[in-house]
Image: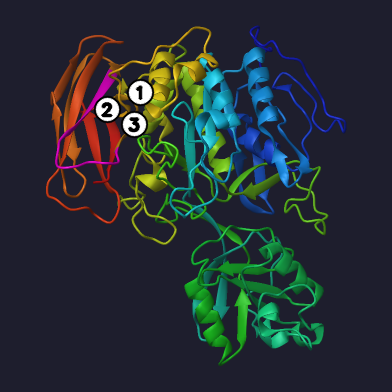
Amino acid sequence: MGPVPSKWRGICQRGTKDIVRCNRSILFSTSHYVGHGTFTLSIAGGNFVPGVTAFGNGNGTAKGGSPKAHVASYKVCWPPVDDDECFDADLMAAFEAAISDGVDVLSVSLGDDYGREFFKDGVAIGAFHAVKNGIVVVAGAGNSGPRPGTVTNVAPWIITVGASTIDREFTSYVALGNRKHLKGVSLSSTSLPSQKFYPLISGSDARTAKVSSLDALLCRPGSLDPKKVNGKILVCLSGETTPIEKGQQALLVGAVGIILANNRESGNEIVVQPHFLPASHVNYSDGKLVFDYLNSTKYAYLTRAKTEVEVKPAPFVAWFSSRGPNLVEPAILKPDITAPGVDIIAAFSEAISPTDENFDKRRVAFNAESGTSVSCPHVSGIVGLLKTLHPDWSPAAIQSAIMTSARTRDDNKEPMLDSSMERATSFAYGSGHMRPNRAMDPGLVYDLTIDDYFNFLCAHGYNEIVLKLFSNKPNKCPKSFTLANFNYPSVVVANLSSEPVIVTRRVKNVGSPSTYRASVRAPLGVSIYVKPTSLQFSRIGEEKKFEIVLKAKVAGKPEDYVFGQLKWSDGKHYVRSPIVVKY
């Protein structure tokens, strides 16, 4: 690692337990005791570490998105007060400290359970100040999916990141006596003898006296009879308690293994867990097969957890990843992008157990976790590389490069799906799944200045008195500016009618001289044409405007939003923008 950059103005501040020491890589650190900061920071800026596994799974070399970056962590969340851990005052103080210290990228793996008005949201306010100072801000979209309208961190000056899978899984198969093999997931480091069958028992059949069948089926503490379970594989229904807690109960009553079966509501919603005993967590449909099998022969075995790669389809959108539409400002599509956020291996704090359960005394240097807190630093790390490669690019240009170069197809070359294996939409993945190499050379970018953001806030409904609080100068709201003309890399028209709507955009050339031609995949029931249909650029930095004219083809409203795409291409670059319409 090279010397500390001369522009760094921060100091090394250690916490009371002195867990993390500053060095030329870690410039600023305050102690954290839940592992979240260590995990996310290593994804963004961790160096190369060979031979990394999570409980013996996924062996390989770990590295962050910007492995040669200098990193600083700012602690903003503390032990709960009235069930709240993260307060706006602490968030904004951290943003201001980072701005003062001279950071280039801010990775924010936290947020509310829902979107908040921009200037009632500590992350949005802090991020606005950061972007004013040329700092790119990346934040997670939230983990409240798949319900619509749950996306958070929705300000347009923030790169909002959803979570999707990669082509790797940690699998453990359930082999039933009827020769059916059901694929589940597990990180358990223990295993049963190969192909040795054990008797199965459901939690409800193993209940103690005066315990309901449902409580026992859920494997609640104290609900299971050790005499009935000992030496058997226990089958538990998901819900109410965590998978790790169910596994702990299975271990306490003498089970040799556990099968966790999702209920109908959970469907395919599974996150891999480091169980204490051989385990397999299966989805609802496979869980139903297990319970049906229990009514006949009752023998099975579990395969050892293993790593499978080149899994298809991948990526698909994680079930927990928060979805649009953006309820704070429907004219802005959120999330912007998705990135790997499911079963990701990264560094972990040895100050806490890998499951955050009090009964778990294990300590690990690396763990596997999921969430938009995990996908967020993947993008932050790539932003660091983009800042190095293109130091003259604005935060908006970097955001545009990441969004317009994204992919919307999986490794089967089919449209991206969600966890239910249904076709996903832009409300799930935004512009698509991040492609770092394409973002390095996007061809064109949709750029924005601070004045553009102020114009956006005016059109959103803020007055000049409020805006003055966030600027060193008075800002006069333009009379003619509309949200439709805010130069964002995606397009949303939430109230299209039979009257045409004209959307204006402006693109800047960041590549070699070239001519770009437009192509459109119109949303269902919408006619779209672009004028002009071609844009010729002769130099870097040259800007051109164009219009998108949208009109509903026929009267009547669809049940929901419809989705399309605009693409500019010169044969080498493909500059894609999602188009989302409701009429």
Where does the image place residue 218, in percent across and percent down from the top left?
67, 75
Q: Quadrant of residue 419?
A: bottom left
Foreground pick, 167 / 485: 485
Q: Is residue 253 visible?
A: yes
Return the residue at label 1. Answer: 441
State the CA–CA distance, disc 1 to disc 2: 8 Å
Secondary structure state at the residue bearing disc 2: loop
- Is 184 on the left-hand or right-hand side of 202? left
Residue 505 within the magenta-colored segment of the rendering? yes
Q: Is residue 508 above or below residue 364?
A: above
Q: What is the magenta range?
A: 493-507
**Residue 380 on image: x %, y %:** 53, 30
Residue 193 visible in the displayed image: no
Residue 573 shows which numbered tag?
2
Task: Name the residue type under label 2.
Answer: His
Q: What residue do we see at 37% from left, 25% from top?
A: 459
Measure the C-alpha gap from mark 3 to mark 1: 11 Å
Q: Quarter of the image containing the N terminus? A: top right
Answer whether labels 1 and 2 touch (C-beta < 8 Å).
yes
* Sooner in the amino-acid sequence: mark 3 or mark 1: 3
> Please, which residue is most extreme toward the bottom here?
296
Q: In the displayed structure, would residue 38 be above or below residue 411?
A: above
